[in-house]
Image (cartoon, rainbow, N blue to C red):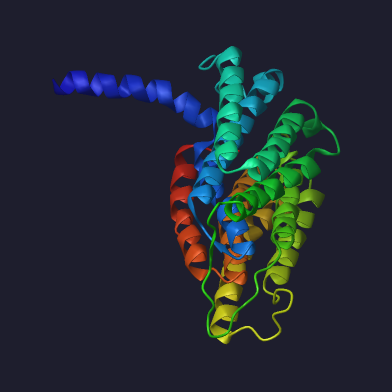
Amino acid sequence: MTAVSGRLARRVARRVAPWAELLRVSALCTVPGDALAGAAAAGLRPNRATLLAIGASVCLYEAGMALNDWADRAEDAVDRPHRPIPSGRITPRAALTASAALTAAGLGLAARAGRPALGVATALAATVWSYDLHLKHTPAGPAAMAAARALDLLLGATATGGSPSPSPRPPSPRPRPPASPLASAALLAVHTYAVTAVSRHEAQGGSTRAPSLALAATLAVAATATRPVAGDRTPAAPARLVVAALAADYARTPAAPLLHAALNPSPPLTQRSVGAGIRALIPLQATLAARSGAPVTALALLALAPLARALARKVSPT
C-alpha cells in the first residue's frame, strides 16, 4: 500500500512540476500585495471585493506566465531547452489554452467586483497579452510590464472602492491621509520597469548598465516611499519608523545581487538579481501599505517573504 502511494505521489509530482515551473508559482507571493497596497492607498479596509481583485490578479498573472513561455518557445529551445515547453513536458497548445482560460477566469472574477474593476482588469489583460505577444522584445517592453503592475495595484483600489459597502479605516488619534493610489502605482511601476530592464539580459548577460540603473532606481524608490504622503506634514514617529524599516528592507533585498550583476554581468548573476528584484516587490508593497496608514496589512504582506524565498529554491521565479 505504501509503495503504491509512493508511486502515485511521484506520478502526481511529475505532472504538477512542469506546470509549477511554467506558471512561476514561486513568484505568486508577489501578487496579492498589489491589490492590498491599492486598497490601502485608497484609504479602505480590504473586503470581499479586494479578495476578488486578488483572485483576478493571480489568474491574469499566471495567464501571462503561460503565454510568455508559449510566445518564447522557439527562443527558449535555444537558450533554455530545459523549460517545460521546449523540453516537451508541456505542449504549446496546452500552455496557450491555459493562458486563455486563466484570462477568462481573471476577467470573470473582476466582473464580480463591479464594472469599474472589470474595466481595469480588461486593460490589465490587454497589457499582459500585448507584452507577451509583441512588446516584450521592443524598447517598450519594460514600460508595458511596469504598466501591468501599476494597473494591478489600481485594480485593488478600484475593486475595494467599488464595493457596495466599502469599509473605511477608522480614524486614529492622528489621522494620516492615504497616499493617492496613483502615487503608489507609480512607485511600483518604477521598480518593475527597472527589474524588467535587467531581465532582458538574463539569458546572455553582458549588461552592466541595466543592473546599475536598477540599483539606483531601487534606492530612489525607497527614499521616495519614506516621504510623508500629501497633506501629512507631521506623521507620528512610530509610523515613520515602520515605513523607514520596511523601505530599508525593500532596498536591501535586491541591492547586493544588483551590485554583483553590475560588477560581473554573467547570466547566473543577472538571473539572481532579477529573482531578488521580483522578491523585493513584497517589502515594497508592504512599505506602500504602511505609508498609506495600514500597518497591519503591511506586516501581513511581509509574512509572505519567507514563503517566497522558500519556493524560489524549488522553482525559479524567472
| 234 and 29: which is toward the camera | 234
Q: In the rendering, at what x and y percent does residue 148 appear? A: 71, 43
Q: Is residue 193 left or right of residue 92?
A: right
Q: In the rendering, at what x and y percent does residue 56 appear? A: 56, 39
| 119 and 297: which is toward the camera | 119
- Residue at point 69%, 35% (across, down): 122
Q: Is residue 1 left or right of residue 317?
A: left
Q: In the rendering, at what x and y percent does residue 178 appear? A: 65, 70
| 125 and 120: which is toward the camera | 120
Q: Quadrant of residue 138?
A: top right
Please say whether residue 310 is visible from this viewpoint. yes
Q: Quadrant of the N terminus?
A: top left
Q: Quadrant of residue 57?
A: top right
Number of marks present in the image shown: 0
Compared to 271, does 220 lie above or below? below
Q: In the rendering, at what x and y percent does residue 159 appear? A: 60, 49
Compared to 172, does 165 lie above or below? above
Q: Quadrant of residue 67?
A: top right
Please say whether residue 248 is visible from this viewpoint. no
